[in-house]
Image (cartoon, rainbow, N blue to C red):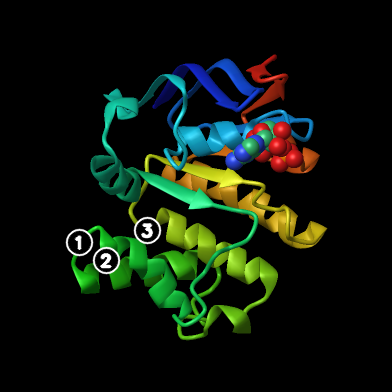
Amino acid sequence: MLKATNIKKRYNQLEVLKGVDISVEKGEIVSIIGSSGAGKSTLLHILGTLDTADGGEIYLNNEPIHLYNSKKLAAYRNRNMGFVFQFHHLLPEFTTLENVCIPGWIAGRKKKEVEQEAIGLLKTLGLGDRLDNKPQALSGGEQQRVAVARALINKPSIVFADEPTGNLDSTNAKELHQLFVRLRSEFNQTFLIVTHNEELAGMSDRVLHMKDGLISA
Ligand SMILES: Nc1ncnc2c1ncn2[C@@H]1O[C@H](COP(=O)(O)OP(=O)(O)OP(=O)(O)O)[C@@H](O)[C@H]1O
């Protein structure tokens, strides 16, 4: 599903990625671990096309997305990629339901169809009774589950998660892990996760170690 080769990135004198190769199969949960500053988030952002590499190739579903211009990428990203970050980045002035719907509406899909799917997703994630609440009325774990629903609304090929449990207590972190596993089992959802959380990495199908700008194992 995702295949990237020889990804390079430098910030001035700092060579952060030295030619990373990575591939992720459909329906796999892959975690990337490694020491602070190893380049994990940089790699995830480049694979998610939120940042650009200095070299290398990225294919998603056999499409050479490293060749796309920014306009084409924005549309492609919206339809094919979901994102979950450490902080949920929900829009405070919109309800839970609206927050989940927004990427679907941006994609130009029918308003009602998106709403129905968002309600279904939120029910699946145990938030069926919080549709009209604003994010600030929800707990941290609930907010992060809304962010997961938002990431899934356009049925993305892959969800990129950057420290998704970094802001959660251990109980909520565990629930989020279980949710990822359930989404993989029920919907064959693919995840690429950067994490320091050993438990989260431990429930992945594969764990990749980043060291000195390369995947070492
Ligand atoms: N925009 C930037 N400008 C300059 N240096 C940067 C920039 N972004 C990241 N870096 C540097 O690149 C290196 C890799 O950063 P990155 O965030 O990818 O590491 P990480 O492995 O995700 O670390 P952590 O586990 O602490 O989040 C770090 O030394 C960081 O300071």
- When the figure is inspected, residue 103 is found, relative to residue 8, above or below; the finding is below
Tags 1 and 3 in contact by the CB under 8 Å rule?
no
Tags 2 and 1 in contact by the CB under 8 Å rule?
yes
Q: Whole-Å distance between the Cαs marked 2 and 1?
A: 5 Å
Amino acid at pointer 2: Trp
Label 2: which residue? Answer: 105
Label 1: which residue? Answer: 108
- Which one is closest to the eye, mark 3 or mark 2? 2
Q: Between residues 58 and 131, which one lies in front from this camera angle?
A: 58
Q: Is residue 48 left or right of residue 202?
A: left
Q: Earlier in the sequence, mark 3 or mark 2?
A: 2
Quadrant housing the N terminus: top left
Q: Whole-Å distance between the Cαs marked 1 and 3?
A: 13 Å
Q: Between residues 60 and 73, which one lies in front from this camera angle?
A: 73
Residue 203 seen by the camera: no
Residue 109 seen by the camera: yes
Task: Indicate the position of residue 61 as horizontal and vertical percent values.
Answer: 32, 28
Task: Indicate the position of residue 121 as horizontal and vertical percent values.
Answer: 43, 64
Q: Earlier in the sequence, mark 1 or mark 3?
A: 1
Quadrant housing the C terminus: top right
